[in-house]
Image (cartoon, rainbow, N blue to C red):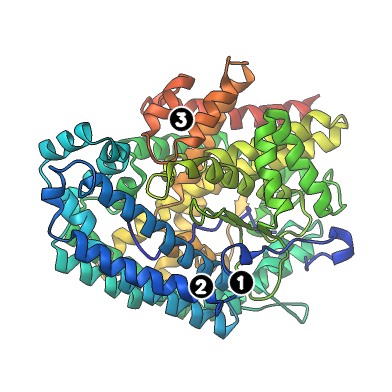
Amino acid sequence: MTLPRPLPPRHFSPSAAGAVAPAEALGLLPVWKLSDLYEAKDAPAFIADMAKAEELSLAFEARWKGKLADAATTTGDGGIGDALKQYEALDDLLGKIGSFAGLTYFSNTSDPANGKFYGDVQSKLTDLSSHLLFFALELNRVDDAVMDACMDRDPAAGHYRPWIVDLRQDKPFQLDDKLEQLFLEKSMTSAAAFNRLFDETMAELRFDVDGEMLPIEPTLNMLQEKQPETRAKAAAALSKTFGENLRVFTLITNTLAKDKEISDRWRGFKDIADSRHLANRVEREVVDALAAAVEEAYPRLSHRYYAMKAKWLGMDQLNYWDRNAPLPETPNALIPWKDAQETVLSAYRGFAPEMAEIAGRFFDEQWIDAPARPGKAPGAFAHPVVPSAHPYVLVNYMGKPRDVMTLAHELGHGVHQVLAAGQGALMCQTPLTLAETASVFGEMLTFRALLEKTTDKRERKAMLAQKVEDMINTVVRQIAFYQFERKLHTARKDGELTSEQIGELWLSVQGESLGPAIKISEGYETWWTYIPHFIHSPFYVYAYAFGDCLVNSLYAVYQNAAPGFQEKYFELLKAGGTKHHSELLKPFGLDATDPSFWSKGLSMIEGLIDELEAMDNA
């Protein structure tokens, strides 16, 4: 258990969603009801739970510390299963407290009171978790044979077998108890502090577009406007403000990269991404094969597509700010929230009524925060909270088609989190190898449902092009991000990096991935600054490419009308973190360790580009 439990990385649309759309065009946008957790920051229930968490944490330490070896030979009360039940209940309680603080903070990061509340709660949870840290460390010191016998003998301990087996994979990288406690307590003044500095700095940034000072979301959204001059102005504003704040983002990046290097060195990780692979329960070779397959496909995917798009827009080369420009065929109308809701739920219902029923609860019970507003966290995420509560979804909805896809994406996460909650607090969290499966599958269902209804050739072309762009952004762009992180963390080992050096690394991978049809001009060298994944979750980004390629293969199985597909799919989601990806994919006849697996996933993107090219030639 790592406490306080972090919020999940935020999903950014290819360029997250002109100015904020008028309210009358979008309709009433929902704001989440955090009172399902606690009524307010000073609510009696919250204060009582804080006191209860402290009492139970201290009591747990007193009851079990130094006694787990004996507990492993005991069945029933006083056994490992008994300890794990108590530990899981604590994990749920502390997770609920931390989630409420985090969701409150990300509702408005500009509010100093929210920042203080979040910081104070994080600090308190870190203090409490120091009393629980012994549990995983001591459990891993129990002899393997003794622990195996314990799980075989005691049904209560056996219930947690997947969690215990997972935990023991961390064993070679554990430090002694005092060092682990130091790392935990110092995290508040190291990584956590610089994460918060990034979030608050980003929330306060303003971008001058024709004299209007805009936050990052509406400015990024202008990169999807039809008018080329609007896109150019937005790009210039983004580059200017990023450039003016390079010093702080460079400091944050250098500090966090060094902090990670220190931790990895002390723990004995050999490769800069191995700690992420371990957390994801995925083999380095599998990720390497994915990255190699995507890089090899750059010319067939992004290079080829952007050359076609340049021709459609009447340009020899696209400017970097034209990458996500809409085609002339793209409809101009904004999509009201109610229409977005029905589009996603209808697509989900067409796959399985249960899926739509679960997703519908997010709308009906106010589990979604949709308006874009000053101070609100940019991007989008779905936070699972804890099994005793329910997930929440954050989006910044502005009525663009991509916003509908983002909604479908995050609701896929939400459905996954609801279904996996049955595994309990310790085993509900899905490794990143499969964490993007339901979200990308939800996007694919929504896209296919919309495409089937589209008979107009021009609209169909616009839809196909947008889907290809989204897939390129999910696969090609994220692997380029992963390679950027690899270069950055490798170079950081030799000393602190200047802003210019980081910019050069950024441009090197962007040029390779985007190809010759995209003109990389002055200003783009600073755009690494706004990607939150680099800050909050180093090397997370390959999970998007993993998920997209996996879902492409999974969807092909579904299209071939494989018997019992929906049931198998729900079993996959319900498994949470109890099974390895190889075990979960086996019923579908898929194997991510097979090098051809990634080629199959990438071939779907290539097929859509083929279809676009055929439409041009028809």
The residue shown at (19%, 59%) is: 64
The residue shown at (57%, 56%) is: 381
Q: Secondary structure at mark 2?
A: helix
Instruction: Describe residue 393's horizontal placement relative to residue 400 as left or right.
Output: left
Say which mark, if any, is on residue 71: none
Q: Secondary structure at mark 1?
A: loop
Which image quadrant for residue 329? top right
Q: Amino acid at mark 2?
A: Phe
Q: Which residue is mark 1?
A: 39
Which image quadrant for residue 344? top right
Q: CA distance from mark 3 to mark 2?
A: 47 Å
Residue 191 at least partly seen? no
Q: Amino acid at mark 3?
A: Trp
Instruction: Describe residue 206's horizontal placement relative to residue 510 as left or right.
Output: right
Q: Amino acid at mark 1?
A: Glu
Say which mark, if any, is on residue 598: 3
- Cβ atoms under marks 2 and 1 closer than 8 Å: yes
Which image quadrant for residue 30? bottom right
x, y percentage for residue 364?
74, 51
Q: Quadrant of the C terminus?
A: top right
- Cβ atoms under marks 3 and 2 closer than 8 Å: no
Single out the mark in the foreground, 1 or 3: 1
Q: Which residue is mark 2?
A: 46
Q: CA distance from mark 2 to mark 1?
A: 8 Å
- For mark 3, does the 10 Å Cα neighbourhood hold few (<14), some (14 to 19), or many (20 or more) residues? many
Q: Secondary structure at mark 3?
A: helix
Whichever of labels 1 and 3 marks the residue nearer the N terminus, that label is 1
x, y percentage for residue 436?
52, 43
The residue shown at (28%, 42%) is: 166
Residue 216 at least partly seen? yes
